[in-house]
Image (spheres, grey):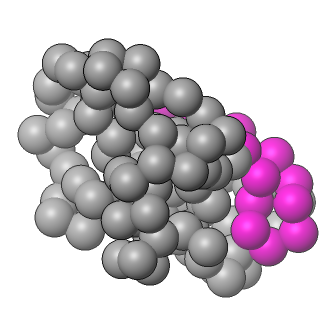
Amino acid sequence: YTEEMLEAMDEAQKPRVISVGEASYLVTLGLCTHLGCIPSYEKEDKSFACACHGGTYDIVGNVTKSPPPRALDIPPFTIRGNTLVLGEVGPEWLKMKENGLTL
């Protein structure tokens, strides 16, 4: 995320941002939680749109329009120094899971 994007986020969006060193990222599975279609990023709206059934997600993957039943899923990850490692369960991901941000 750019500094401008981070400043525009509300408090409900910030917990889904992953920071590694000076950089901030969205780590998510690119599959709609409704039926598994692939949402496209809409740069103008800073959102993700699923063409299958019209669901939308905000810039961090939270649902903004149904039918998706939940936010985009965050895969297991860990942070080692300044490296983001996908596929490994780390304390950062466990905290997100405990806070209900992913399954």
Quarter of the image where one finds residue 73: bottom right
Regarding residue 28, the answer to whether it shows in the image is no
In reply to whether residue 9 is colored magenta, the answer given is no
Q: Is residue 81 left or right of residue 27?
A: left
Q: How many marks?
A: 0
Q: Is residue 64 above or below residue 20?
A: below
Quarter of the image where one finds residue 30: top right
Residue visible at 17% across and 60% down in the picture: 10
In reply to whether residue 36 is colored magenta, the answer given is yes
Residue range highlighted in magenta: 30-43
Identity of the residue furthest to the left in this view: 7
Nearer-the-camera pick, 16 or 55: 16
Q: Is residue 73 left or right of residue 67?
A: left
Q: Quadrant of the N terminus?
A: top left
Instruction: Residue 11: give x, y in percent of width and height.
Output: 16, 64
Instruction: Residue 65: give x, y in percent of width and height.
Output: 57, 73
Instruction: Residue 20: give x, y in percent of width and height.
Output: 29, 26
Residue visible at 56% across and 51% down in the picture: 89
Quarter of the image where one finds residue 7: top left
Instruction: Residue 80: give x, y in percent of width and height.
Output: 38, 26
Residue visible at 45% across and 55% down in the picture: 93
Q: Is residue 44 left or right of residue 66?
A: left
Q: Quadrant of the C terminus?
A: bottom right
Q: Is residue 94 above or below residue 26?
A: below
Residue visible at 77% across and 52% down in the picture: 31
Magenta stretch secondary structure, dominant: loop
Regarding residue 70, the answer to whether it shows in the image is yes
Q: Is residue 40 left or right of residue 37?
A: left
